[in-house]
């Protein structure tokens, strides 16, 4: 089975968690795109969707799914998003699609955070996927130097401007043994908007597409 087929299966599986009157946070990426397609079938039941990117907003609008501005909400009932990597604690690297900051805000607002992923995203130790950091443009060189001091090899993502008008540095060569500590350290660097480590706010559930079907993973106690 192709990876794309697995993404479709798990994107569809997330629909089961969407109940009437929910405010649904919607992530970004190719797996979530399949979820949005399915969400359209429940668009008359939900209160609305809160989007994490211009790309997802455009797709929601094209399917006439009602959109709610996060500024008008106290919280979000459920947040469905993809991941680039996740570990056994359901901590993740996200931001391959450059939407990490808005994704992190919605994750923070969410009562329940469900990540949808295929088997290729499952790792024991985070860091093989280059860790994205959203940075304000004038701080790019300064932040790069600080990231080198942390042992990483930051690379400027060419020709990418985030929905917030910022740039992305992707950090290669990391073996993230303490994701919470690293998230806090990188977020504390002046000029960093946010790092794509979702460790302080990990997923509550990961729906994992495998060749044997969709598995529901929860963090080990
Ligand atoms: C976007 C993200 C995505 O969730 C992540 O890149 C996974 O994408 P895909 O489902 O296309 O593999 O973090 O910023």
Image: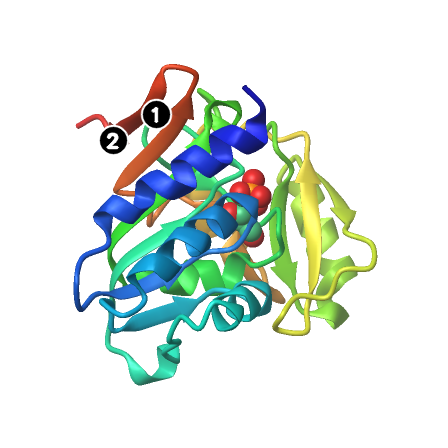
Relative to residue 155, is residue 211 drawn left or right? left
Neighbours of disc 2 within 10 Å: few (<14), some (14-19), many (20+): some
Q: Are marks 2 and 1 in contact (CB under 8 Å)?
A: yes
Q: Residue furthest bottom?
A: 72
**Which residue is tagged 2?**
219
| Residue 21: image location, x then y, percent | 17, 69
Q: Looking at the image, is mark 2 or mark 1 earlier in the sequence?
A: 1
User: Which residue: 33% across, 35% down?
Assistant: 206
Relative to 110, is 144 above or below? above
- What's the CA distance linking mark 2 and mark 1? 6 Å
Instruction: Residue at 63%, 67% (x, y): give it.
Output: 191
Q: Which residue is mark 1?
A: 88
Residue 176 appears in the rendering: no
Label 1: which secondary element: loop
In percent of width and height, residue 202 lies at: 33, 44
- The x, y position of residue 10, in whole percent, is 40, 36
Q: Residue furthest right?
A: 158
- Which one is nearer the viewer's eye here, 111 or 201? 111
Q: Residue at x 49, y 35 (%)?
A: 7
Q: Secondary structure at mark 2?
A: loop
Q: Nearer the viewer, residue 191 or 131?
A: 131
């Amino acid at each position: 089975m192709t990876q794309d087929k697995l993404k479709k299966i798990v994107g569809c599986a997330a629909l089961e968690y969407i109940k009437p009157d929910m405010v649904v946070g919607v992530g970004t990426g190719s797996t979530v795109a399949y979820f949005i397609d399915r969400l359209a079938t429940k668009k008359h039941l939900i209160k609305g969707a809160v989007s994490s990117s211009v790309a997802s907003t455009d797709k929601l609008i094209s399917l006439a799914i009602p959109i709610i501005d996060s500024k008008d909400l106290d919280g979000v009932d459920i947040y469905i998003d993809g991941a680039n990597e996740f570990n056994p604690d359901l901590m993740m690297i996200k931001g391959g699609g450059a939407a990490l900051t808005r994704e992190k805000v919605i994750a923070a607002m969410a009562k329940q955070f469900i990540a949808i992923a295929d088997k290729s995203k499952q790792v024991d130790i985070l860091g093989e996927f280059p860790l994205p950091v959203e940075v304000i443009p004038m701080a790019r060189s300064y932040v790069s130097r600080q990231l080198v001091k942390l042992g990483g090899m930051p690379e400027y993502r060419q020709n990418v401007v985030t929905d917030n008008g910022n740039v992305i540095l992707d950090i290669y060569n990391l073996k993230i043994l303490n994701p919470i500590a690293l998230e806090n350290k990188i977020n504390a660097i002046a000029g960093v908007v946010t790092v794509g480590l979702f460790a302080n706010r990990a997923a509550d559930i990961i729906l994992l597409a495998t060749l044997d079907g969709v598995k529901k993973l929860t963090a080990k106690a």
